[in-house]
């Protein structure tokens, strides 16, 4: 059983000095913790900005490179998609593949799909894989 005992002196200057000593600890903790919290907030905002940028880039690349065959929603319901029997990108057949498998299919081509590693950067291919994962969430 801990008990706190406070003793106040009759001297106001001594009392003020004791209060100042007690209040320095929270200030010291704040000085140490505040930069850490600021760094964490900055890191979080950068991560969110990069994720949003990847999403926009993947969407833009998909619309310009993939949508003519796969359709704007990835369903494959386009004249080219239906004639070539392109699978729905929302399907388990596509979504069950690993990110590496999807990136290889985009880069190297697969079945009737041409390779895109000559026209898309590795970062763009990665952004497309991220976009494909997001398509499955939107269905």
Image (cartoon, helix red, strand yellow):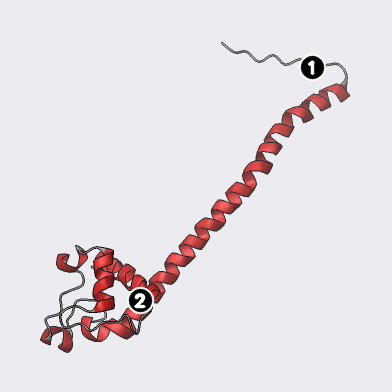
Asked whether, in this view, residue 14 is left or right of residue 107, the answer is right
Q: Nearer the viewer, mark 2 or mark 1?
A: 2
Query: Against 81, is 134 above or below?
Result: above
Q: Quadrant of residue 67?
A: bottom left
Q: Quadrant of residue 73?
A: bottom left
The residue sitting at 26% across, 82% down in the picture is 115
Asked whether, in this view, residue 133 is left or right of residue 123, the answer is left
The numbered disc on residue 59 is 2
Tell me the SS state at disc 2.
Answer: helix
Q: Earlier in the sequence, mark 2 or mark 1?
A: 1
Which of these two is toward me, 75 or 117? 117
Percent position of residue 56, x then y: 40, 74
Crowd around label 1: few <14 · some 14–19 · many ≥20 (10 Å): few
Percent position of residue 106, x then y: 27, 76
The residue sitting at 70% across, 32% down in the picture is 25
Percent position of residue 5, x then y: 69, 14
Percent position of residue 24, x then y: 74, 33
For label 1, the residue is 8
Tell me the SS state at disc 1.
Answer: loop
């Amino acid at each position: 059983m801990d008990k706190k005992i406070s003793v106040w002196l009759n001297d106001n200057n001594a009392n003020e000095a004791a209060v100042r000593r007690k209040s320095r600890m929270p200030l010291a903790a704040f000085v140490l913790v505040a930069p850490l919290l600021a760094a964490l907030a900055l890191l979080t905002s950068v991560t969110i900005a990069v994720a949003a940028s990847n999403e926009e880039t993947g969407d833009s690349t998909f619309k310009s490179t993939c949508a003519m065959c796969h359709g704007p929603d990835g369903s494959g319901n386009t004249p080219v998609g239906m004639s070539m029997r392109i699978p729905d990108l929302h399907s388990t057949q596509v979504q069950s593949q690993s990110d590496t498998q999807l990136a290889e299919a985009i880069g190297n081509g697969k079945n009737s799909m041409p390779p895109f590693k000559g026209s898309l950067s590795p970062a763009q291919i990665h952004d497309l894989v991220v976009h494909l994962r997001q398509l499955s969430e939107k269905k």
